[in-house]
Structures are given as structure tokens and as C-alpha cells.
Amino acid sequence: MEIVDEICERGVVERRVGLKVEGGETVPGIVWLPEDAMGPRPTVILGHGGAVHKRAPEVLGLARRLVRHRGYAAVALDAPEHGDRVTDKEAARAMRRSLQARIDEGPGGPPMAVDANQTAGFLSRVGSHVGELRALVEDFVSTGFIDDRLGYWGMSMGTGIGLRFVASEPRIKAAVLGLAGLGAGMGGADFEAAARSLRVPILFLFQWDDELIARDAGLALFDAIGSTEKTAHINPGGHVQVPVFENDAAEAFFVRHLGAGA
């Protein structure tokens, strides 16, 4: 992993990095860690949602609080065709408009229309990014950046990708997932199979009035998760209205399962 640049604000170092992956591509990412940090510490990989990027407000806010409150490190990568990896800007703008239009319709409306090509493209990007996240873990292990205190947090697309990643990466010890459901644009049987294979503690967040994910789909996903230790937090409101206090719950969850920071 190469360091591109670094700034420090109120005790939080924000390090822009490039992760070299198979095929020669450099995946842009950000690592957040305490100022003057030395040695490995609990680390949380953050997965952003669809149509946003590695420094989206919800990602940045959680990363900074984990560093400031707990002495953790946090890291986020841009998923394919997101953030600094967008190759078709008009398609990215169209996706944002489509998502916003569906949210504006309110809960209970028809699901977003997705054709076969869009589904195939999404699943291809999912597979690629799962591999990139595993490469990230390998890089951190090889450099001694992390020990065995590794967690994952990701909402919406961050669960569509992250649930598969967590299921395939035994070094993840606990995960916060949510804003996703079975048969709700997250892929088919492999997504459900990955959910059923989970064994690590899971905190699952869901919005009761989610415009993008039907209630029964979200509840079905929580039911499918195979972990014996799993908890659901359900709040009123839409897809982008997760209460800020759920960051308190995520922070406490990680401390419970990853331990205190340095």
C-alpha cells in the first residue's frame, strides 16, 4: 500500500492511500488513525453505500469517532465505479438521480427497475471488491498494521458487498450490517448462502420505512444470518435516515467484540 498524502485534524490522521491489487490496478482508499499511533490496534473496515464513496459523511463520521473515542484505526476503499474510480460519470449521475427519485416516492412503492445487464454488472463489481477487501487485509497483515482485532461496518451496498466479504474472511471478528434485504437488489442465492454461513457477532440496522428495501426482505435477511449472536436495531424513517445515535451502538458493539483501543 502506498501513501499518497496525509493530514492531521484534531488528533485524527487521515492518510490517503493506494492499494495495489491483482491485475495492476491501484484502489484508492483512506486510513484514519490516532496521531502518533504506534503498533497494531483494533481496526474497522468501512464499506460505503451505493452512489457515494469512501469519504461519505456517514463513513467519515464513524471513522473519526472510532479514532477519537477509542484509539481505533479505520479504513475505507472506493468500490468499483464509485468515488475516484468512476469511469462513466453520466451513468453515475443517472444512478444517483434514480435512487433519489425512488426515495422521493416514499415507502411501499414499486422496487427500482433493474435489467439483466445492470444486475450482472453489479455482481461483477461485488466479486471484484470482495477480492480487493481481502487483499487489503493481506496487506495489513503483511505490514504488521493489524493483529486479530478486525471488524467490518457497511450499510446498503456496503452490506451487499460486505456480507459476502465477512463470510469469506475468517479474520473478521464482528460486523455491523444493514439497510439490505434478501432479494432486494443484493444478488441471488449466493447472498443468502453467505448470510446463512455467518458465524461472527452481527449488529443489524434497519429502517422501518425504508423506500429501497421492503420490510419483509430486511427481516428475512436478519432471520437468514447464521450467527448465534445477532441483534437487530429497527428505527422509523427512510433509507438515509438512520439515527446518529446508532453510531453509539456500533462503537459499543465493536468495543465489546474487539476490545479497547491503544
Image: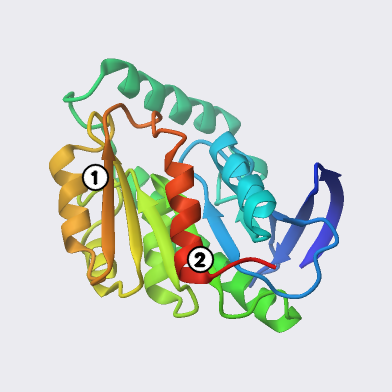
Percent across and percent down for residue 106 are 25, 19
Name the kind of residue labelled 1 in the image. Ala
The residue shown at (35%, 72%) is 200
Q: In this view, does 7 lie to the left or right of 216?
A: right
Q: Which of 252 and 3 is in front in this view?
A: 252
Residue 184's label in the rendered image is 1
Mark 2 lies on residue: 151
Residue placed furthest toward the top: 104
Percent across and percent down for residue 209 are 23, 28
* CA distance for labels 1 and 2: 25 Å
Give the SS element for disc 2.
Answer: strand
Crowding at label 1, few (<14), some or many (≥20) Cα neighbours within 10 Å? some
Residue 70, above or below 195: above
Quadrant into which the C terminus falls: bottom right
In terms of image quadrants, where is residue 241? top left
- 1 vs 2, front mark: 2
Give the SS element for disc 1.
Answer: loop
Lower position in the chain sequence, tag 1 or tag 2: 2
Q: Is residue 130 left or right of residue 156?
A: right
Name the kind of residue labelled 2 in the image. Gly
Q: Which of 187 and 75 is in front in this view?
A: 75
The residue shown at (61%, 53%) is 66
Q: Is residue 89 left or right of residue 183?
A: right
The residue shown at (24%, 45%) is 184
Crowding at label 2, few (<14), some or many (≥20) Cα neighbours within 10 Å? many
In terms of image quadrants, where is residue 212? top left
The residue shown at (79%, 53%) is 15
Residue 163, above or below 61: below
Query: Can you see residue 165?
Result: no
